Image (cartoon, rainbow, N blue to C red):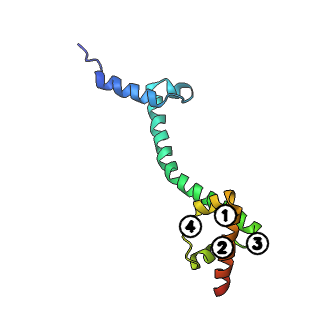
Amino acid sequence: MRVRPGSATRQRRKRILKDASGFWGTRSKLFRVAKQFVTKAGQYAFRDRRAKKREFRAMWIVRVTAACEARGISYSRFMCGLSRANVVLNRKMLSEIAIHDAPAFDKLVEMARKNAGAAA
């Protein structure tokens, strides 16, 4: 008499196939294939949770750089001037200020110019 797979096996297979729902073709239908691609999807998710932080920081820097160049100052001089003026704003907030509050960003640029010019 053979032993049939128990409820634990069925639950594991259902969970894998549920995780694979939305995948294309046999990747979402067949257990063996779905298991491979759910594992691979997990690896991508792990990697990209870390990459996302780098990508956002790069985007904020690009935005702040564009706003600085429009006002005639380089990004590096701007950041140097802010740090010398003891202005503690992260790049995300600087980016938001540059987009939504131009007069405040202009004041930050002037502050940075004053403090960057002192040592340069």
Question: Which residue is tagged 1?
Answer: 64
Type of amino acid at the residue the image marks with label 4: Leu
Type of amino acid at the residue the image marks with label 3: Gly
Count every numbered label the image shows and give the total.
4
Give me the C-alpha separation between circle 2 and circle 1: 9 Å
Type of amino acid at the residue the image marks with label 1: Val
Kindly identify the residue that appears in the image at 46 percent across and 47 percent down: 46
Report helix, strand or loop for mark 4: loop
Type of amino acid at the residue the image marks with label 2: Phe
Question: Which residue is tagged 2?
Answer: 78
Report helix, strand or loop for mark 1: helix
Q: Is residue 56 left or right of residue 1?
A: right
Give me the C-alpha separation between circle 4 and circle 2: 12 Å
Q: Is residue 104 left or right of residue 83?
A: right
Give me the C-alpha separation between circle 1 and circle 4: 12 Å
Give me the C-alpha separation between circle 2 and circle 3: 10 Å
Q: Nearer the viewer, residue 117 or 19?
A: 117
Question: Which residue is tagged 4?
Answer: 89
Up-down: is 61 above or below 30? Answer: below
Q: Is residue 48 visible?
A: yes
Q: Earlier in the sequence, mark 2 or mark 3?
A: 3
Label 3 with label 1: CB-CB less than 8 Å: no
Up-down: is 21 above or below 115? Answer: above
Label 2 with label 1: CB-CB less than 8 Å: yes
Q: Is residue 87 left or right of residue 17?
A: right
Image spot of residue 80 (x, y percent): 61, 76
Kindly identify the residue that appears in the image at 47 percent across and 24 percent down: 30
Q: Nearer the viewer, residue 50 or 70?
A: 70
Question: Which residue is tagged 3?
Answer: 72
